[in-house]
Amino acid sequence: MFTISSMIITTTITGTMVAGVG
């Protein structure tokens, strides 16, 4: 559970960074 939640959070942060850069 925690691993899945952590992965979702990481994906969200990465997506935000990519959106900010792009």
Image (cartoon, helix red, strand yellow):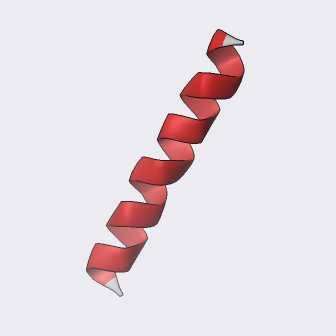
- The residue sitting at the bottom extreme is 22
Q: Where is the N terminus found, in terms of image quarters?
A: top right
Looking at this view, is 18 or 9 the one in front?
9
> Residue 16 placed where, x, y %?
36, 63
**In this picture, residue 20 sits left or right of residue 3:** left
Residue 11 pos. (x, y %): 55, 49
Number of numbered discs visible in the structure rendering? 0
Q: Name the one closer to the observer, 17 or 1.
A: 1
Which quarter of the rendered picture does the C terminus lie within?
A: bottom left
In which image quadrant can residue 21 be found? bottom left
Residue at image position (62%, 34%) is 7
Q: Is residue 22 above or below residue 20?
A: below
Please give left or right for residue 8 compared with residue 10 in the image.
right
Which residue does the image show at 60% across and 25% down from the upper left?
5
Answer left or right for 14 relative to 3.
left
Instruction: Give percent across and percent down for residue 8.
Output: 59, 39
Q: Above or below — where is 19 with respect to 13?
A: below
Whether residue 1 is situated above or below residue 21 in the rendered picture: above
Residue at the far left in the pictured view: 20
Q: Residue at x 41, y 72 (%)?
A: 18
Q: Is residue 2 above or below residue 5?
A: above
